[in-house]
Amino acid sequence: MLAYERTPPQGVAHTVLMKGTVRGQETCLALCPYPKRESGTCPDREGFPVRPRRGQDPKDESEHFAADALRRMNEVLARIQELEEALDDPSDVWARLRAAWRRAEHEEDPRMAEIVKHSRELKPVLTELLKRIRRVLRRHRELTPLDRVQEMDRASMVWLSRQPGRSVAERAGPAQRILATVRKENFDTLENRVLHAYVRLAADAAREWMREHPRAKESARYAQVETFRKTCRAIASLLGELRVSVAEPGSTPNYVLMQDRGYRRIREGWERLLRRDKAIDDLWAWQAQTWTDFAVLAITLAIDELEEAQLVAQSPIDWRSEAVTGRWFQQDRPIAVFWLRKTGRIVEVQARPETPGPLLTAARAHVALRITDPTRSEVPHRVAVWTPHAMMRLDLDPAVQEAAALVDQLQPLAMTEVLRHGLILTPAHGIPETAQAAGKRSRVHGIALGASGESLAVGLDAVRQFVRGEFYGGPA
């Protein structure tokens, strides 16, 4: 994440997080994607892990590191994508999302994923297709015993006329064979090539999913995916024996792939997996964006859990079929507004605000809470939220100290609003942790949390404690 005057220079891949003005100077806060190789330019970066390729097990330390990073990214994606299911009931979004996240706190209940849906929906389709794999009769010429010749074409007749002898028997020679047209079953059709490509890709996706959930071996979902993988491998082996080649991505579907219900569903599933594999490249580059959305949802859930909190306004959430720069949904600002009935305050959860104000702009915090008391004439109170994402684990203690010192330095800018508290939400990398630091007039908390298992449970509990401490005082 970088700050530029006005706009980033040309040639720099980026997405704008927010724009603001500090003392008359326009500032643009932009996020640059992670490089897809070990290094990148504009800006210069070195030592990044390369995303593991599907179907390849990690072999050395760097590949294991990259595999762990991919697993953590998939866990965050799973929490974000659970919002899509929660949106099925717009009146109860946060309660439904909270229930899904609570299930994710137990590692024996593995995450939902595209391959899990395939194992549930497409396994019966594969079983049915296995009984009726399409085949065609193809004509070709070969030396055939005289008593089995049924058909001859022009080329066969020309061949026969050139053989020595006066009768057919003499021309057949000692082996009594002549060149004739024969028909043989051939399974190498486009629809079977697509089927072959699908089962190979699905088996790799299932193996990757199972590798990421070693503690869920006793769950029904794990057993379902494992059975599906075995089915896919068996079909792939059979198609290999039948000499069926593998379809290339982008193949134009034929009549069977469009009209036959079973083959059509397999083609659609194959295309979904291909799109997912392509999308993972983009999500890998923009996972800092996805982490920010995860942090925003965590804070929103923590506020929604307060007994006195009443949701008075919620931004329409537009779910996308594909992520754009790491973001699966688009929403207006703020994403949610809560009314605290007993304490009489209004709390807005803001992410990437359009008019951040000088304090948030100078703090480089593109997530914030805006707290106002409509019964008083006091200026609004803001809580800055930083969501740093890194491949290596962030050291929280110096981070909160630096943030507290920064908030102290920003106090002269506090004209129309107050900013004295802050929160850092960063990936735990398997080790959940909290830290805090107090400045002269500031207080900043840091929370390292994960997106599944104990790291999620401990991290969310820390976020709840911070929220309660912010609204009710006392230790957070």
Image (cartoon, rainbow, N blue to C red):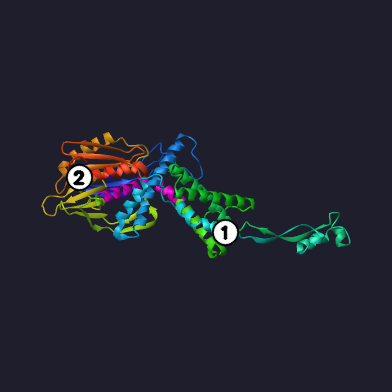
Task: From the image, tell me which residue sits under label 1.
Answer: 129
Residue 167 in which image quadrant: bottom right
**Local crowd size for mark 1, using a 10 Å CA cut-off: few (<14), some (14–19), many (≥20):** some
Task: From the image, tell me which residue sits under label 2.
Answer: 470
Given residues 166 and 335, the one toward you in this image is 335
Q: Residue at x 54, y 49 (%)?
A: 230
Q: Is residue 102 left or right of residue 61?
A: left
Q: Is residue 216 left or right of residue 166?
A: left
Is tag 1's residue or tag 2's residue first in the polypeptide sequence?
1
Check disc 1 and report its element: helix, strand or loop. helix
Given residues 154 and 271, the one toward you in this image is 271
* Tag 1: amino acid: Leu
Residue 15: which disc?
none
Give the magenta part as a residue range.
277-302
**Residue at the far right in the pictured view:** 166
Q: Marks 2 and 1: in contact by CB < 8 Å?
A: no
Quadrant of the image containing the N terminus: top left
Quadrant of the image containing the C terminus: top left
Q: Residue at x 82, y 60 (%)?
A: 146
Q: Is residue 29 left or right of residue 116?
A: left
Pinpoint residue 453: horizontal percent, then vertical percent. Answer: 37, 43
